[in-house]
Image (cartoon, rainbow, N blue to C red):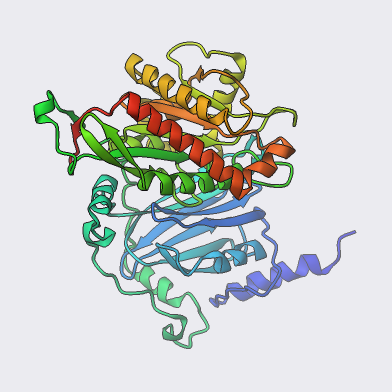
Amino acid sequence: MTHPHVHHQPMKRRTWLQTGALSLLLGQADIAWGATIVAVRVWPAADYTRVTIESDTALKTVPLFVANPPRLAVDIEGIELNPALRELVGKVRSDDPYITGVRVGQYTPTTVRLVLDLRQMVQPQVFNLTPVVAGNARYQHRLVLDLYPTQVADPLEALIAERLGASAASTAPSMTALPAPPSASKLGSSADPLGDLLATQKRQPTALPPAPAVVQAAPITFAASAAQAPSTDERFIIVALDPGHGGEDPGAIGPRGTKEKDVVLQIAHRMRDRINAAQIKTRHGTLPMRAFLTRDADFFVPLHVRVDKARRVQADLFVSLHADAFFTPEARGASVFALSQGAASSAAARWMATQENRADLVGGLNLKVQDATVQRALLDMSTTAQINDSLKLGGEMLGEIRRIGKLHKPKVEQAGFAVLKAPDIPSVLVETAFISNPDEETRLISDSYQNELADALMRSIERYFSRNPPLARTRNT
């Protein structure tokens, strides 16, 4: 039997709202009648910040962008304010590169207005994702707000500046300083906490700017002869490290709750330190090395963007790091995979590629914007030379990993991994261990094993370059 107050309280609230008063209602446990908000999440990163609102049914939204001061307002229709949305207010970190704060209010009796106060002008994407169940990721409907910078620093230029000892700030594109959003104390004593935003509705709101285009790979020019090769002062080896998963996509999860995305990022950081301190002796002289991470924090990167990033910095190698799970906890050992132009080398390799290629589905890709680019990225652009070099690198890695632990397969496996499809970069995917195995999960989270693994992979990279010197090329900045 339903308690009587459940019928009367919403009616009283609607009557009160119709008088024109607005309230944040942050202290009341109001229940959304049109949709239930399941969770809210914020993923800040230098590349972009993502806000995700998960609900049991799809949310209908109307986004508005206000330029001065910069704010993104999103009207969510068919719901009333609830405690889950209140949590979003406290989830914004003080060091978020794009968001200074979040406000939320009941704009109309059936519409909640969400306002993101921004540090700078952005290129926002607002889109919906359908429910997905993949491995340990189980999401209902998701409303996604992605905030991209309007100007993006050239990653290759940053690496060159890093190599030359210049500060990163000196190479970053300049951005026009924007006034900070008004503080709550400057909003006046009006009972309407969103009054400053609502006042802007007297003006025509700015339409959302077009979504950012995916950065295309920088051109790569190979020297025609040794006489044209750049000097060692101009040339250095770049290794792209690709920590798998991230953000909304946790990857595999071990029996103790260890997330694959966290472990592989830790290993990537250890490898970055080793690569940045290394030098390789080649016939062109002694060449320094620099590491480039496709993600250096906990955020989602689409598979084709990982490839694009590596090509943009003209990487000499691409190493994707993973720690997958299997149906049974008995599976153990490390594996190394290269791309296959045809059929997979085994059923297990084909299964692994299928699992990894679902990352975009889990992490959440705005297909309305990226569809054409994604279709291009899904084309098999591989070359025989790239695959042959990838197999050589993979062989070196298996030889070094064998010295510190067990191998799952004694040879390099091949399958259609989307993340390995850079046509001009030797690329491998390393499954460092099975995180689903309790013993291997324990090893993966230990400093000693992570260091041993980073050392083994570093030795294999050095051995690969000693036997396969990188081609001389000019780096376009």
Could you say which is closer to the camera, residue 42 or residue 195? 42
Q: How many marks?
A: 0
Instruction: Give percent across and percent down for residue 377.
Output: 38, 28
Q: Identify whether 340 is placed above or below 30.
A: above
In this view, the residue farthest toward the right is: 1
Q: Looking at the image, which residue is at 33% across and 17% down?
A: 385
* The quarter of the displayed image where residue 424 is located: top left
Q: Quadrant of the C terminus?
A: top left
In this rendering, would 22 be left or right of 166?
Answer: right
How far across and how far down the image is residue 114, in percent? Answer: 50, 63
Q: Nearer the viewer, residue 102 or 396?
A: 396
Q: Nearer the viewer, residue 447 or 426?
A: 447
Q: Residue furthest bottom?
A: 189
- Residue extending farthest top: 343
> For residue 176, which quarter of the picture?
bottom left
* Nearest the eye: 261 or 108: 261
Residue 249: tell me if it is visible: no
Is residue 378 placed above or below 211 in the rendered structure?
A: above
- Residue at position x 70%, y 47% from top? 257
Residue 265 position in % (x across, y down): 51, 46
Which residue is at a point 44% across and 34% down the rendered structure image?
459
Is residue 282 toward the left or the right of residue 437 in the image?
A: left
